[in-house]
Amino acid sequence: MDPRTLPQLQGAPFLTDGGLETTLVFRDGLDFPLFAAFTLLRSATGREALARYFADYLALAERHGTGIVLESPTWRANPDWGERLGYTLDGLAEANRAAVALLTEVTAPFVAAGGTRVVSGCIGPRGDGYRADRLPSVDEARAYHDWQVGILAGTAADMVCAMTMTTAEEGTGVALAAQAHGLPVAISFTTETDGRLPSGQPLGEAIAQVDALTDGYPAYFMVNCAHPEHVQQALTPGAPWLHRLRGLRANATRLSHAELDAADRLDDGDPEQLAGLYVGLCARLGSLNVLGGCCGTDVRHVHAIATACTPLFRHLVR
């Protein structure tokens, strides 16, 4: 698919889901190892829990008259994490396929009713999403992520999204792997409280680096797993890269990644306050239109974000 044909690039608002793993663990009381939600696909009970989770966000998109981008629960479904979880490569490949199949199934009624949905294959970092504990070269990252991108390219996924990237090199590697397989890709970096990536690189420099090394292949860029106030630290007025930032999936909490790692309870913040911060970022970033949540957020937060932000797109909402 030509990346330019993705419907969210037309500027109308698209919702995403919230904090998949934190919702399932802290709110639904499910137990799965290493934040690897794809392991739930092994049982009927787990598949039903995932389907219910996504159905709640589809209902929100229908209520607010927006499109929706849903990420497959495959953030941990890459070879290193799969090995730690006891998966063979064949088993891991089947899990990736099953995750996308679940999304196409659960979104079918939404599409039949005229809704616009994008199924995105989620690619997570090779290492820890909170720390730049691996510093791969671009070639190393491309070779590593090529396997999962290739599996997802053989499914009904409309695109892939590299979520919680901690270095520009790893984001570039995913983008190049997606390009090789002919898949549109979004690159989503995470930032620390100062607006810099965990690697220490400024967000704008990371976006510019990926674009320079891929001839601008990514359809767009995002930020996830950071509070809006942390993201604001990175936004230099008039910077040429700002128009490439189209998506935001923020945390409900202002905690740093280190504090989140040490936390033993969920900090779900204030949904209305979070939504107000999204409005401010939408005003500063005219291209921002893919809106959802990350750690600590659930349907309450995304509903508040949609309620506050969709009026900004009134002329584009169906």
Image (cartoon, rainbow, N blue to C red):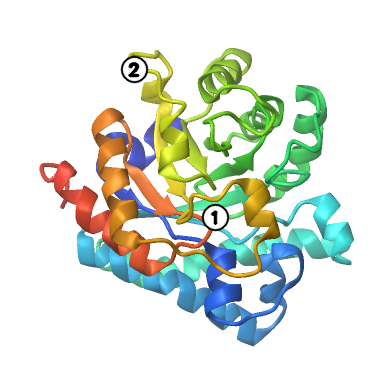
Residue 75 in sight: no
Choose top left, top right, bottom left or bottom right for residue 32: bottom right
Identified at 71% across, 56% down, the residue is 76
Which element type, helix, strand or loop, lies under badge 2?
loop
- Between label 2 and label 1, give the one nearer the viewer: 2
Distance from disc 2 to disc 1, alpha carbons, whole Å, reads 39 Å
Contact (Cβ within 8 Å) of mark 2 with mark 1: no
Front in this rendered view, residue 302 or 45: 302
| Rendering coords of residue 145 (x, y %) | 75, 40
The vertical placement of 61 against 67, above or below, is: below
Front in this rendered view, residue 243 or 281: 281
Choose top left, top right, bottom left or bottom right for residue 161: top right
- Label 1 amino acid? Ala
The vertical placement of 132 against 226, above or below, is: above
The disc at residue 156 is: 1
- Count of numbered tags: 2
Which element type, helix, strand or loop, lies under badge 1?
loop
| Rendering coords of residue 53 (x, y %) | 47, 73
The disc at residue 237 is: 2
Q: Which residue is at the far bottom?
A: 45
Looking at the image, residue 309 sits to the left or right of residue 245; the answer is: left
Residue 191 in sight: yes
Identified at 63% across, 80% down, the residue is 30
The disc at residue 21 is: none
Looking at the image, residue 213 sits to the left or right of residue 218; the answer is: right
Identified at 69% across, 55% down, the residue is 261
| Rendering coords of residue 204 (x, y %) | 51, 20
Q: How many residues crowd around disc 1 within 10 Å: few (fewer than 14), some, or many (20 or more)? A: some
